[in-house]
Amino acid sequence: MKKILLSMFMILIMIGVAACGPSDTADVGGETDTSGGEEADTSGGEADTSDAKEDGGTLYFYTWSEYIDPDIYAQFKEETGITVVEDIFGSNEDLLAKLQGGATGYDVYVPSDYMVEIMIELDMLAELDQSRLETIGNLDPTFTNPPFDPNMGHCLPYFWGTTGIGYNLEDWDEPPDSWAYIFDPELASNFSGQITMLDDMREVFGSALIYLGYSAGTTDEAELAEARDLVLGIKEHLYSFESDTYEDLMLTGETRMSQGWSGDIFAAAVEDENLWYIIPKEGAVMWVDNLCISADAGADPERLDRVYQWLDYLNRADIAAQNTNWVWYASPNAAAEDGILEEILTEPAIYPDAETMERLEFLGNVGDFTETYSRMWTEIKAAD
Amino acid sequence: MTDQIPSKTHQTQLRLDYLAKGYASFINRLKQLFFNGYAGLVYLFLYAPIILLVVYSFNESRFPTYWTGFTLQWYRVLFDDHLVGAALKNTLIVATSSTIISTIIGTMIAIGVERYRFRTKPVVDGLLIMPIIIPDIAMAIMLLVFFKLIKMNLGLYTIIIAHVAFNISFVAIIVRARMATLGTAMEEAASDLYANEWQTFWRVTFPLLIPGILGGALFAFTLSLDDFVITNFTSGPGSTTLPVRIVGMTRRNITPEINALSTLMLISAMTLVPLSLWLQRRAKMS
C-alpha cells in the first residue's frame, strides 16, 4: 500500500514540477523569458538559441492562423533579439469579443478593414506614428489612405484580396465574368444546387449590392431590401451558405461555382488546375487586413519600441516579398514586387490591373445600420 | 377411435409445436440479426468519422475531402510546426496543473459533503452542480469579466483557474459517488481499533477512494485537454492552447495536418484509458 502511495506521490510531484517549471512563461507583464522560455516561445526560435543578440524582450502578435511565413519569426529574433509570440483568433468578431471582454497584453492585432473602423471607435488601437517607420515609403499609394483608417492613422496594411467567383474551367469556354451567373435566377438555374455563397452577412450583401449597382456598404434600407430579394430569388439554386469548406466542395465536384475569397480558391487551384477565380466585371468587394497597435502597447514606450521594430521589419521589401510568396495573398507593399514570385505577380486575380482596381470597393463600417443588415440576413437564412 | 384421436391430435400438436419452434427460432434469429445489424450501424455511426479522420491524415492532397495518394508528409509538417508544439505545451501545462488542483480540492469537498453534516450542506450541494449546468459560454464570459474586475492579466494562470473552476465539480461528484458506495463500516472498524481520524483517513478511506479519485482526475484531465469555449475567452498573450489553435487553423483551411494532430491526440487518449484501468487494478489488488 505504502509503495503505491509513494509512487502516486512521486508521479504527482513529477507532474507538478513539469507543470510549474515552465509556467513562468505565462507572465504577461512582458518580462523576459528565461529557463523554459526558448521552448515555450512560439517563434520556432529553437534553431538559434545560441543567440546572436541579447534578449530583446517579447512581442505578442495576435493574428490569423497561417498568415505569416513562420521563418520570419526566427529571422526577426536573430536580427533584433525580440521573441515574437503568436496567438490566433478565428474571425474579426472573435477578436472584438475578446478585447471587449477586457483582454490585454497583446501588442499587435491583424483585423480586417471594417473591424479597424470599429476598433478605432472603441479606442482599442493606438495611433500610428509613421515617422518611426523607415519603410513607410514602400507602400503602394492605393493603400495609404483607406476609408476605414484615413491616412493610416492607426494601422499599416498587411495583405489584401477580393471576394469574387470561384469556378470550374471545365464548365466554361468563357469565364463567368459577371455576378449575373450567380444572381440571375435563370443563369443560376444552370447550376442549381451546385453554387455556394459565403456564410457572411456583409460579403453576401456586398456582392449583391455591387451587382445591383449600389455601394457595397449601403445604408439605404430600400437598396438593401432589393439586395435581400435578389438573394432570396436564387436561394433555391444554392447548395448552401458556406465559408469554411466551400473550396473543398468545389474540389470534390459537389459544387461548381462559389462566391469566395481569392486566397482560398487559389489554394484549391493548387490541387485541381481546373478551379479558377475571377473578379466579375461589375466589381467586387476588396478587403485589407492590417497591422494595428493595441491601445495598451501604445501606452508603454518599451513595448511600443518593439512594436515599431516589428512593423518596420514586416514592411521591409524583402520580408514582405518572402511573406507574400508564402501566404499567396497580394501585398500592399509596392517595393516588395521585385522579390515576389512571377506567378503571383502576373495573376490578375491576385494582382488585378489598374482598370479592375477601380471597380473594387471596401465594405466599410455601416454603424448602427448593422442591425438592419442582421435582420435582412436572418430573413434570407430563415426563408425556405 | 378414442385411442387414435388423441394420438392424431398429439401428432398435429407435435407438428404444430415443431412449426412454432421453427418459427420462434426463425424469429429469434431475425431478431438477433436485426439487433446485430442495428448495433453495427450505431457503431458505424460513432466510429466512421473517426476512421475517416485517421485515413485522411495520410492523404497527399492538402484538402481533407479529396483522396490523391498515401503520404506521411502531414506528420512531418506537424512535427516541424513549432506553433503547434507550443500550443501542445500550453495545453499540457494547463491540463496537468488544473487536474492536480481540482482533484485535491474536489476530493476534499466530496469527503466533507459526504461524511459530515452541516447547516449549509444543501447550498454546497447546489453550488457544486452549478458549473456543470451553466452553459460554457456563460461561464466563459463570467470568468473573463471577473478577471477583468480583479485586474488580473490573462494568461496561462487564468486558464488554469477557469479549468479548476469547472473541474472541481466533476471530480467531487465522481469521488462522492465512490464514497457513497463504500459506506462507513470500514472507517468505524478502524476507529474501533483505536486508529485516530488522521490514520483512518490515510490508511483506510484514502486507499479505498483511489479508484474514484483517479477516475475523477482522468475525467478532469480530458475535459481540460479539449476545452475550447472557456479557454478561448480566458487565454491571454502567449497562452494559445491546442484546441484554440486547431479552431483557428480550421478557420483558414482544414489541412490534413489537423487530421494528423487529431489522430495523435486520439492515440494518446486511447492509451490513457488502459493506463488508468491498470492503476485502478493495482490499487484494488493491494
Image (spheres, helix red, strand yellow):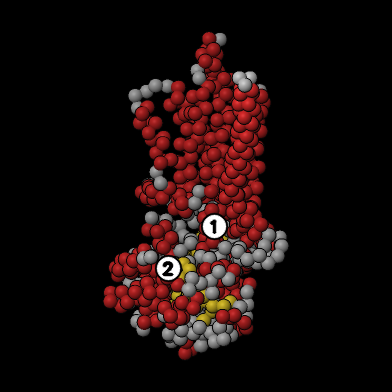
Element on which disc 1 rests = helix
- Image quarter hosting the C terminus of chain A: bottom left
Looking at this view, is B208 or A130 the one in front?
A: B208
Instruction: Please name the residue that numbered disc 2 is placed on.
Output: A200
Chain at numbered mark 1:
B
The amino acid beneath tag 2 is: Asp
Which quadrant of the view contains residue A100?
bottom left
Chain at numbered mark 2:
A
Looking at this view, is B47 or B212 the one in front?
A: B47
Question: Is residue B237 left or right of B148 when viewed as pictured?
Answer: right
Q: Is the residue A342 above or below the residue B38 in the image?
A: below
Question: Is residue B113 left or right of B45 when viewed as pictured?
Answer: left
Looking at this view, is A279 or B189 the one in front?
A: A279
Give me the residue at 51% from left, 65% from top: A244
Between marks 2 and 1 in the image, the one whose residue lies nearer the viewer:
2
Q: Measured from the top left, where is residue B40 in percent x and y?
A: 61, 46
The amino acid beneath tag 1 is: Arg
Instruction: Please name the residue that numbered disc 1 is placed on.
Output: B245
Element on which disc 2 rests = loop
The CA span between labels 2 and 1 is 22 Å
Give me the residue at 57% from left, 33% from top: B214
Which quadrant of the view contains residue A122?
bottom left
